[in-house]
Amino acid sequence: MNISLEAIYQAKETLKQVAYKTALVYNYFLSEMSGNKVYVKMENLQRTGSFKIRGAYNKIANLTDKEKQRGVIASSAGNHAQGVAVAAGIYGIKCTIVMPKHVPLSKATATRRYGAEVILYGEVYDEAYEEAMRLQKETQATFIHPFNDPLVIAGQGTIALEILEELPDVEVVVAPIGGGGLISGVALALKTLKPDVTVVGVQTKNMPSMAEAISQQKLVTVNGLLSIADGISVKTPGKLTFEVVKQLTRSLL
């Protein structure tokens, strides 16, 4: 899979001065409702407001000097955009982000404030991705993929290390799936360190691309509907993430 537990530990060191170690909070309502002890990993309080800074920074920190000089480009529904913009700003790298037209204004504005050039294109993430790839060929900037990249996945996997530090007897971990970067990193770390943990992935019914891929046992593109969960509205999951999810997780709609 080109991703190892060692790579996730290395990402943890890389992120030490950049990403927050977010709280793992016991949720009384969900616990009472489900009959389980439910904890919530508060990545909404992470720097830039989501876990995406972990993977984006880990990728950019590992670029060669030549790659950094060419600048970076990314496509994103919003959270990856901000992570890339912050990481690029730390290293003084030129940064371009292509976002879908209907991305929340707050996310586009925040990305610009972090220093990135923002281009709005397409209705959903996949269309923004195609435009970003076209621009990448023109500019030769380094493309920072939001999920289908070993270094990005390793960065997201640091969440699992923090969960195990605070809750070593965890039994089940539930994570959302868009392209699959988050759940791939989390599952790789958890299933290596604690094989009896069950990792469950959840998708929106409006865009169940990974769930369909798992069901058909091959990569598929789903022309679904727009969802309020814009960050996980991905038509086609990653080739790398699909292999990880297929082997290590349970997927639910």
Image (cartoon, rainbow, N blue to C red):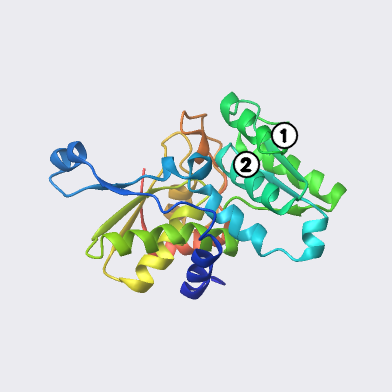
Return the residue nearer the eye: 179 or 11: 11
Q: Secondary structure at mark 1?
A: strand
User: Is 54 above or below relative to 221?
Assistant: below
x and y, in percent, of residue 67 in the image: 78, 60
Q: Residue at 75% of width from left, 50% of height from top?
A: 92
Residue type at numbered disc 2? Ala
Cβ atoms under marks 1 and 2 closer than 8 Å: yes
Q: Which residue is mark 1?
A: 118
x and y, in percent, of residue 52 in the image: 53, 48
Q: Which quadrant of the figure contains the N terminus?
A: bottom right
| Separation (CA) of disc 1 from disc 2 | 9 Å
Q: Residue at 59% of width from left, 60% of height from top?
A: 58
Q: Which residue is mark 2?
A: 81
User: In the image, is 77 to the left or to the right of 201?
Assistant: right
User: Is 3 above or below relative to 232?
Assistant: below
Residue type at numbered disc 1? Val
x and y, in percent, of residue 220 in the image: 55, 50
Q: Quadrant of residue 81?
A: top right
Q: Is residue 116 visible?
A: yes
Q: Secondary structure at mark 2?
A: helix
Q: Quadrant of residue 106?
A: top right
Q: Identify the mark nearer the N-term, 1 or 2.
A: 2
Q: Residues within 10 Å of mark 2 (few under 14, many from 20)?
A: many
